[in-house]
Amino acid sequence: MTLDLSLLPDGGVPWLAASGEHSDIVLSSRIRLARNIAGFNFSARERDGERLRILAQLRDALPRIPALASAMVLRMDELSPVDRQVLRERHLVSRELVGADGATEMRPASAVLVSEHAGVMVNEEDHLRLQVFRSGFDVPGALQAAVRVDRQLGEQVPYAFHRDFGFLTSCPTNTGTGLRASVLVHLPGLVLTQEITKVLQGLQQMGLTHRGLYGEGSDVVGSFFQISNQTTLGRSEDELAEHLQRVVKRLVEQEYAARRVLARDAGYIIEDKLWRAYGTLRHARSLAADEAMNLLSGVRLAVGLQMIGGLSIYTLNKLLVFGQSAHLSHHAGRLLTEGEANVARARYVRGVLANEVSSDG
């Protein structure tokens, strides 16, 4: 099976639109709900036949679930390693669903459902992992949409639920609400003013955790951080989402303050650094993935500080995702070597930036 990205609703990445609040700092808000289907073993003990029946039960229920009725169903075990990585680069699937280290063999019946309203990972760590994205800073909006889809799905597929403990999950830390609320933020101001360590320690004390751009198992590159709740038991969905919203709002204010300090105290130094980043992206003939991320981070900060005009946050969001290695290989129609991907990445970035400047002028 070959992945046709044009068939995915909005490409599966409407959150790239930069249409939400504080989109210069907050790329996206996400709500993920972990659910298991009653009557089946959890993932650690389930057999292949059970996994197939779970997927079949979900497929049969789709026409009766308004938010998912037109969802595209992609079997992960039928896609190539490159296509699976493309889905991960678009934040549609997790590292576990892709398969460790690009494995060629997948567990049977692993799949992802993609609709314009939500996505559902099937047979990951839990039977179902429903997720909803919103562009910019909109945790309440993402939660409202996720709860609506969850209720529709739960009316057709019986969830494993305990009266005292709530929704039952494979990992005890997800038991209760099964909710993971997260925001993807860009914090170069706090990094450059060397305030980031203190800020991240403060987040941990408030029950939040941070990861890299692609969540668990990914490194922080380019000052992009994924901030999320650590526990789900003992609080309601609304309480967890409200707590994250409140803390991240303060975090955004701190980032804006750090940017003002940079502009005031290190104006020429920062301006030179950011324009150099832009110049490199405009003219480089080879760009490694991490290098491109760091340079895009600099240009994104420059746009936020209004040092560079004619560039949209939407364009920078696209470069961040579509310039990843699997996307470049998918576009080329074959697996690119690291060196080939670096050349292709530089060519793609140059082309997008040239078109942006041309269309603006």
Image (tube, rainbow, N blue to C red):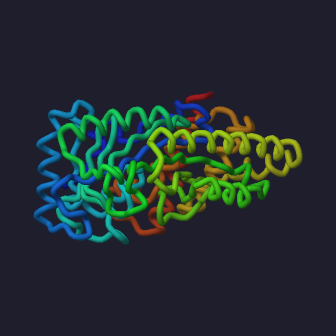
Residue 339 point in image, percent of width and height: 48, 68
| Looking at the image, residue 158 lies above or below residue 220 | above
Residue 171 point in image, percent of width and height: 37, 63
Residue 38 appears left or right of 145: left
At a point 46% along the width and 32% down the height, the residue shown is 141
At a point 51% along the width and 41% down the height, the residue shown is 239
Residue 112 point in image, percent of width and height: 27, 50
- The quarter in which the N terminus is drawn is bottom left
Residue 341 appears left or right of 301: left
Q: Residue furthest right?
A: 265
61 and 287: which is toward the camera? 61
- The quarter in which the C terminus is drawn is top right
40 and 301: which is toward the camera? 40
117 and 292: which is toward the camera? 117
At a point 56% along the width and 60% down the height, the residue shown is 287
Total label count? 0
At a point 21% along the width and 34% down the height, the residue shown is 65
Residue 19 point in image, percent of width and height: 52, 30
Q: Residue furthest front?
A: 164
Asked if one can make out residue 334 in the rendered structure from this viewpoint, the answer is no
Asked if one can make out residue 340 in the rendered structure from this viewpoint, the answer is yes
Residue 68 appears left or right of 165: left
